Amino acid sequence: MFLKNCWYHAGWDFEVTLAHDALVTRRIAGESLVLYRKPNGAVVAMEDRCPHRQAALSLGRKEGDALRCMYHGMKFAPDGKCIEIPGQTRIPEQACAHVYPVVERNNCIWVWMGEREKADPALICSAVPLRDSPWHMLPGKMHVKANYRLEIANLADLSHLAWVHERTLGGSTRYAEVSPKFEITPRGLNTRFWVRSVPVQAAVAHLFPPGAHVDVYFEIQHTVPCNWILHHRVFAPGTAADDCSGGELLFETWTCQYVTPRDEDSIDYYYCWGPRHEQNLPGLSEMLRDTAEAAFIEDKLVLEAQHARIKEKPHYPQISAAFDAGPGRMLWVLDNLLKAEAGESTAHLS
Amino acid sequence: MFLKNCWYHAGWDFEVTLAHDALVTRRIAGESLVLYRKPNGAVVAMEDRCPHRQAALSLGRKEGDALRCMYHGMKFAPDGKCIEIPGQTRIPEQACAHVYPVVERNNCIWVWMGEREKADPALICSAVPLRDSPWHMLPGKMHVKANYRLEIANLADLSHLAWVHERTLGGSTRYAEVSPKFEITPRGLNTRFWVRSVPVQAAVAHLFPPGAHVDVYFEIQHTVPCNWILHHRVFAPGTAADDCSGGELLFETWTCQYVTPRDEDSIDYYYCWGPRHEQNLPGLSEMLRDTAEAAFIEDKLVLEAQHARIKEKPHYPQISAAFDAGPGRMLWVLDNLLKAEAGESTAHLS
Amino acid sequence: MFLKNCWYHAGWDFEVTLAHDALVTRRIAGESLVLYRKPNGAVVAMEDRCPHRQAALSLGRKEGDALRCMYHGMKFAPDGKCIEIPGQTRIPEQACAHVYPVVERNNCIWVWMGEREKADPALICSAVPLRDSPWHMLPGKMHVKANYRLEIANLADLSHLAWVHERTLGGSTRYAEVSPKFEITPRGLNTRFWVRSVPVQAAVAHLFPPGAHVDVYFEIQHTVPCNWILHHRVFAPGTAADDCSGGELLFETWTCQYVTPRDEDSIDYYYCWGPRHEQNLPGLSEMLRDTAEAAFIEDKLVLEAQHARIKEKPHYPQISAAFDAGPGRMLWVLDNLLKAEAGESTAHLS
């Protein structure tokens, strides 16, 4: 089950070019889409399905603002309306491809999968862009064969840094002992926590003196479906108050991670990570990007195996633990929104 | 759903040899078959299924006219009757493999999938043979992962030459403007149309002066399940009357195309194409065969994507266009025959 | 459907090592397992499923006797009980991974898939070990995509030596003419038969004078689910009485074959074969192992094709033959045990 009235990350801006043949396909929340840029650069997101007999429009041809289906030549304006049917002059009103609201913001392409009139750009998560910002972000992308709820649970509980990412992002069981502060928002969950006097994270430990310890502050905005923005600050131990004041800042990064379900069994994972431009030592951004990729492969292995086990026994009882606090809250927010949406469609029907 | 009382193209004659181990498997209309030649050359089409415990007879051994299952040694005569059960003398009457009527004609092997007593060879489509005819035909074969109804719709409407085959068989939107003459037959559809003053088809344009235009006449016999015979004639523009009389013939070919469904999700596509022997310039037949293959790969891409989209949304509404006239008629013929067959089986039951 | 109260062959002993990261996965009778050795060498067989959220324990870490899930760090004792939940002190009683009874015997690891209190080691089949015995056995393993009932039928009727193994284990239609003596046991079938004056088996014929004939005596213990132990003796023709007395023994081997269903559509096949140490000519054991492998690939081809055909037509009528006597008896034993088990679970429910 997917939230429809929701902005989904449909790719990085550079993935959809102005090139003539560039028709990009996506599977988002169970729907097949084709994305292209109009000559003025604006992105169009159309259902990848000709209303005639379901030929794939992504095998078609850009003609100015329009997209021509290259099976029988029907041509669609960027609002989805058919504007040409070869061999006839009459164009039936239903000859219309479905078009999705699109916003391009922070170098991400956001697609709204639900009712057009509810597509409020203010609901797009506030992310750090790839370019033209104080932060030097490098992007990446990965495909994971797991349900997106498993990704939500993964990202809403960083105690797994201690175990899954022992040799990359973690390196200490201290990550499994934190008690985060949660704030439920209308469409997500904010999470903050300190990890005090913890060994430097495994992947960057070689940049510090042997045995170095630090205080780390995590501030996370998590919004539906599963967009996750982390402000990550590393301080000299014992220098920072709980509100970070007075802290000797050693290292500061942002990472933005976007999980877009293709279907019930797989997701696309988009991510970027980076330090301030003025703190970007040669090779540092690349190292962070490579570390992210290594760590997300660790997650991928765990989540794909978990997904396979859940498919084997969908009704297996589960037990709960303290570290489920974050996942529980975030899934509760999602489920409430899903229920509200189901209620509205029922109301429409009655 | 497949028509049972129908001749299906089960392969080219040369695919089934007299060699000792040559047991050819086919999946036709949802059934698994094994084909072999008897010492006298005649082809046998047996269900690829031992009546004992469903071992594959195609892993068996030819012994004279008979086929021995090489799991437990049961031996079947070419009429399917078991003639030996190792270790016992009694042979139960039900020990019988299913055998299908076969006709070898025009270098094609035709198999009847329905009731034996209705297997009338007069129902086989009239095709151009590969050998011993005035035409120099070269054969080919392709597998397409699409339902055969999509192939029917593809072949019954050549407006797609304008779009799918823009760079091979087409090259002009004029193909999308024709109004064919249709004649519904008891088991198919005959279609005739002129395309007047059209640029030479893309794949052969280099053989004509730049910018050359021609008049092209298409005459097609399309029969169930989906056998499609085209007589294709190219005239100097303005020379031929509607009945072709007086025309200055520049180029004349036949092509025979046979679509055999394996199951609901895939088909085997057999085809041949060729000019008259006396017009067969060196390399011409090969070029036509290569052009056909290139064009059928274009179709394959379109139809496989369309099939995938239809699987996603089987009940998606569809809109109709003028160019659906041919597909609509041919599918109407098929559906009537399917209904008649379903009615007969219901009658048998009551 | 699988028998639960039953010992399944889960692998050769050497497959599960004491190495730190050695966590071996198995799929047995529809369940996912992880196997590991404790520091004292004893094997643990745990369900490969963390009770928290079904993460795969096989991606975890051995810690002494225990296994830690490396998703959230929960740690399980070898009896399945959770002994640590990071971040909390309370451990709920249900925090328990399922653990299966294991016995290591004759270099095989045996796992009991049913009720722990019924796991009687006396029910393990009496096999020839790989080491420390008078027999020089070499082991092998193969995966077959077929239901285990087809393997039962295959092993319970050696008439197929005449056909499937014509060029390996057979070489004469005499194998299809035997009338075995059957003895039904509480959990299986014992089978004995002579094949008198038969050409030497194909794979070893080159070790005998051309045209040599022998008398062969087969003694087989077949037990559920599908463990199959053959004592195979070859005598100079006409020298041995029916009880083998007085026989001039030319060749004597044992082979043990264990079929473990993964699920309804595939099995793991474990096997070993060998002569007496004192009769083991250089290269002989290796030749027997290679012959077994060649022969089991012959079976694999036949059974996988048969399985595919049965999936196409699950309700196809079948006819019976004299050579079904063994398979019929062994499947009858299995079905009775399956029915008894189903009855017991029904009784539990009422």
Image (cartoon, coloured by chain):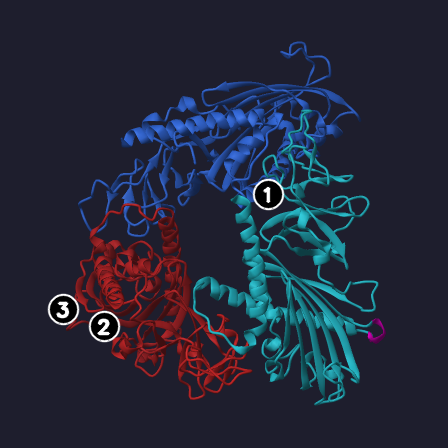
Chain colours: A red, B cyan, C blue
Q: Nearer the viewer, residue B103 or A251?
A: B103
Residue B132: image location, x then y, percent: 84, 63
**Residue C347 visible in the shown view:** yes
Judge whether residue B278 is colored magenta: yes
Label 2, secondary structure: give it: strand
For the question of whether residue C105 can be seen, the reply is no
Residue kind at label 3, given as amino acid type:
Ala
Q: Which residue is mark 2?
A: A249
Q: Amino acid at mark 1?
A: Ala
Identify the residue at horizontal 72%, vertical 86% (top origin).
B214
Quarter of image, res C110: top left
Which numbered circle lies on residue C305? Answer: 1
Q: Chain of mark 3?
A: A
Of labels 3 and 1, the one closer to you? 1
As shown in the figure, which amino acid type bears the numbered disc 2?
A: Leu
The magenta stretch is B277-281
Mark 2 vs mark 3, CA separation in Å: 12 Å
The residue beneath circle 3 is A241
